[in-house]
Structure formats: structure tokens, C-alpha cells
Image: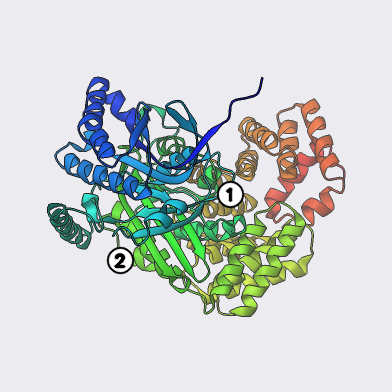
Amino acid sequence: MAEGRVHRRLAAILAADVVGYSRLMEANEADTRARFNAHLGNLIEPAIAHREGRIVKTLGDGLLAEFASVVDAVQCAVEIQTEMAKRNLDEARDRRMDFRIGINLGDIIVEGDDIHGDGVNVAARLEGLAEPGGICMSRAARDQVRDKLGYELEDMGEVEVKNISRPVHAFRVLRDGATGSLAGNAPVAGRWRALVALFAAAIVTAAGLWWWQPWRETVDAARPDRFAHALPDRPSVAIMPFANLSGDPKQDYFADGFTEDVITNVAQSKELFVIARNSTFTYKGRAVKVGTIAEELGVRYVLEGSMRRIGETVRITAQLIDATRGTHVWAKKYDEPIGKLFDVQDELSRQIAATLVTNIQAADLAKASQKRPKDLSAYDYVLQARARWDVPNRDAKAEARALAARAVAIDPTYAPAYAILGTTFNGAYIRQWEGPEALERAYEAARKAVELDPLSSVAHELLGRVLLRRKQHNAAVVAIERAIALNPNRADHYASLADVLTFADRPDEAIELLRKAMRLDPFYPSRHDMYLGRAYYFSKQFDKAATQLETCAARGPKFVPCYMFLAPAYAALDRPADADRTTATLLELAPQFSIPTSVEGHLPFVPSAMRFYVDGLRKAGVSE
């Protein structure tokens, strides 16, 4: 039997849903359904019918409609959003019902009264891209309304969306002010309210105060009973990796580098508690609720953002969320030439800090302005070098050095270029890929970075780590303490100082510093387990040392330093079988490991700590 012919037609599809519907239902199920049905019956259905459209189906918290004309679909959407903005003016903040609307022109499959197909799917994804109270349309729809309607449209570029194989070129209908009225078609009263709201917002901004913006979506609030860590005694924030919306995954390094620099800037305020990049970047590319992020990291505020780099321009958006209340504090958007990128970094960093700490010191804000390169390409090479250095293989780290060297060649006065270059030399020396000449190159680069930018905490930390390898322990402590004074929120600074103090046979101080580092970086790397286990070992707390180093080995089964200190910890606990097994694993991973070369000839322990460690290795069965 032949299959029936599939019926298709071209149609304008409108998809709409209610923002935060689950939250509204949880608060008052009956009231939410009653209000939704009221809006549907006396606003949405009449508006759709007036524009000769039809509702295909309602979907609990939303609806799907089709029109013969894109112009009619857009005008209908504008009417709905304009009227909803008026209705929400008199609603309590937690009862406002905001719709998002997506519009697409596309081919649909018709089955009875139902429709489906790619045209419908794209409309649904566009709806998800719209702001609360906003309208988002496809390029196909935009082409139909261009020059026919007076609405200004914002090009969002090609956006990757769920379950659509190709990027969707999206456009947003721009909004006037804080009332949610739409440009070009708002009633006179709506425009007047918008002007009043804009004037009020300007006053608030000038005073440094930022309040709830009612057109923005609320989020599910974090639950106090689910926090993995107690909230700090000062304002706490996690700055999430800015999404790369350029459509080119190769531009990830640029968005990541921008994020890292914003974190560094904000972290310089001693009045704030700022989560480390290492922890926030574990969420990159994952769809995790803001409340969950706050619960897992133990912070009150979360900053989300996106970046789109197009040729010589950059578009950056950011929104600060109070996760404990489930509310947006503010949102910012920047469209600037690429040459003003550092201005955006500074303004955004200061906005975050000034919002969270109303009496923030001017000196703290001044420090956030990092020295800028003479040529933006030097900055670009630095970001690429950082990204390659984070890749755990020798070839990538060699590429990082080459990129850093290019940055230095382009701008010999740019401190971050010397800092990443010095990091590559120091890392090669520590891994024993290169000899003492690499350490000297690292020392030269670190000194140059500090000289060029005395306010760079990263440069001071690098100098301290290099001084440690030169066995200048006291000077190393001074350098990294300076780094902490400049940036009291950088977890790596505390871990590095703890590393120096352990080698200097001051393990009890190191333990306290590592606890601070782990709180600032809740998803800390396995090397911090090693640092802490090693500090416990030298503090002669062997049970704790073994437990922490076992965790290190479980998280990094091929991370040799875990076994270097776990074997003598077992020996100190009189667990010879465990010590033998661990020593065997150590020598399997590092066949050339020996006391004369790998320890006495390379590790920068002070004499008292060196004697203690060598005795422990001998007890664990490591040969001379």
C-alpha cells in the first residue's frame, strides 16, 4: 500500500513560553494556571486571531501558532509583549509573568490540526534565545519584515542551538528602556514610562546602586541546605567562562583569556571572595543551573557572560546574578572596536566590584587596570600561549613558549608576555625536560615581568617559584607574599607560598595556606592534594599525609609526585607492604627516579627537610 503524501507548506511560526514557569507553579499552582489562562483568553488568542493566525496548540507553559504572513506574526508578537509589559507593572516582582517569543519562516509538515518539522523546531530554539519579554526571529523572518515595519533589529549572529545541526542566524527586536516597550511601535504612554524609567535608572547608576530589572528572568535560587561550603564573611562571586559566540571554536582561547583577566582584576579587591578560574572553568560548555553552581562553589553571586569577536569589533554581554535570591542584579552589553577591549575589561571588573562592595577602596579599583600592550596582537599571542600551556603534553607546552616569544618580540614592554614565557622555562626545568639554563631564562623573564609591571601578582608569584628552585627560600617567600598582597583571592598564590614553605621546612604554615587555596578553588587540581599531603608528611602527621596522598594518586594515577611522598608516608606508618607497592608504582612511572639525581640533585629542600625526606625514601625502599 502506497504511503500517503506528506503535506507541507511555508508558514510563519510563533513559539512562546512563560519564563520561570516552574518557579511560579511551585509558589502557587492554581493562581499561576488561572493567570496564564486569563492572559491566553483575553490577550493572546484575540491578538493572534486579529492578525489572522491560529493557535496550533498550547504546551502547559507556552503555545505554538502559525501565520500566513511574517509581518502579521511579528506585529502580533509586539502587541502581546507590549500589553504584557503594561500588565506586569502592577504585579509583584515574584508574580510577574514574562513571555519569550521566537518567530521563524520555514517549511512545516501538516498532520491534521498539528504541525511539526524543522521550521517549528527553529522557532522553538529562537524562543529560547529571546530575553524575558523579548522577541527573537530567524534571518528568513527578518528578510520578510525588513523595510515593512519600524522596529530596530539587533543582529545576534549565527548561534549554535540544541538539536539543530546548523547555526541559526538570529535577530532580536530591540527594547526601549526598562519598561519592556518595543522600539518603533510603543504607545505614547509606554514611551513616556520608558523615558521616566531611563531617567530613574540614570540616577541609580550615578549613585552606584543597581536594582532588580523586572524584564529579566528570575532563576532558581540556591538552597541554603545544599551549600557544599559555608558562605564567606564577605561578598562572594564566581565568574563563569564567557561563552564564545563567534561560531568558531578556535576563538575559545580569546573568550577564555578575557574571562581569566576579568577574574584577575576583580580578585584584586580584598573586600571580595572570588572563586578561582580552575573551578569556574569546570562548568565550561555544561548546562548547569546558577543555583547549583552557587551551591557547589559556596558563593552568593554568579557572573555569566558571552563574547562574540567579528573582525575588528567585539560584542560582550554580562549579567550578575544573586543566586541566593534567584534574581538578576544587573546586565551589561558592550559593542566596541577590538582596540577598546581593555576598557571593557576595566569597566566590567569595576562594575562587579563596586556592586558587591559599596565602599570599595579607590586603590583597589585602580589596581584592577592592568598594564596594556602597545599592540593588541601581543595580547592575542599571550592568550594563545596560556591556552596551549594548559594542555598536558610537551608539544603543546613548546608551542606555548613559541607564542609567548612572539608576544615579547611584538611588544618588549608587555609584562604578561614575559610572565608566560618565564612560566614555560620554569615548567621545563621542574619537569627535568631542560637543565639549569632554562631556570636562568625563567629567572630573567620573571624579573623583567616584575620590573615592567610591579602590580602584577602573577609576575611576583612566578619570581617566587623561580627563586625557590634557585634555593633562595627567604626571597621566594617575600616575592609570593607580595603576590598575595596584590591579589588576595588567587588560589595559586597561596598554594605556591605553601610549596615554598614546605621546602623551607615550615610545613604547619603551609597547611593553613593550602586550606585557603582549596576554599578559593573548590575543584582544585590534584597537585594541591600532593602539596597538602606533602606538608602533612613533613609535619609528621603521617596518617593525614597518607590519606591526602592516596586521594592525589586516585585523582592523578600517573602523577609521579603523589607516589614520591606516599611511599615514605607508608614507611613512617610501618606499612611496609603498602610502601613497597607504592615504590614499585613510582619506579614504573619514573624508571630514572633516584635519590641522588631526582631528589638531592633537583628538589630545593633546605638541609633539615632534605635529610628527613631522604631517610623516608630509604625506608620505603628507594635505591641510592
Whether residue 444 can be seen here: no
Give the answer, above or below, for where 271 lies relative to 561. Answer: below
427 and 240: which is toward the camera: 240
Tell me which corner region of the image, top left, top right, bottom left or bottom right, holds residue 317: bottom left
Q: Position of residue 56 (x, y in %)?
A: 38, 30
Name the amino acid type tagged 1: Arg
Number of marks in the rendered image:
2
The structure residue drawn at horizontal position 61% and vertical position 32%, both measured from the top left corner, is: 544
The residue carrying pointer 2 sits among few (fewer than 14), some (14 to 19) or many (20 or more) residues within 10 Å by Cα, namely few
Foreground label between 2 and 1: 2
Q: Position of residue 146 (x, y in %)?
A: 37, 59
Q: Are marks 2 and 1 in contact (CB under 8 Å)?
A: no
Quarter of the image for the N terminus: give it. top right
Q: What residue is pinned by disc 1?
A: 506
In space, the residues marked 2 and 1 are separated at their CA atoms by 36 Å
Number of the label disc, if any, that sits on residue 587: none
Q: What residue is pinned by disc 2?
A: 362
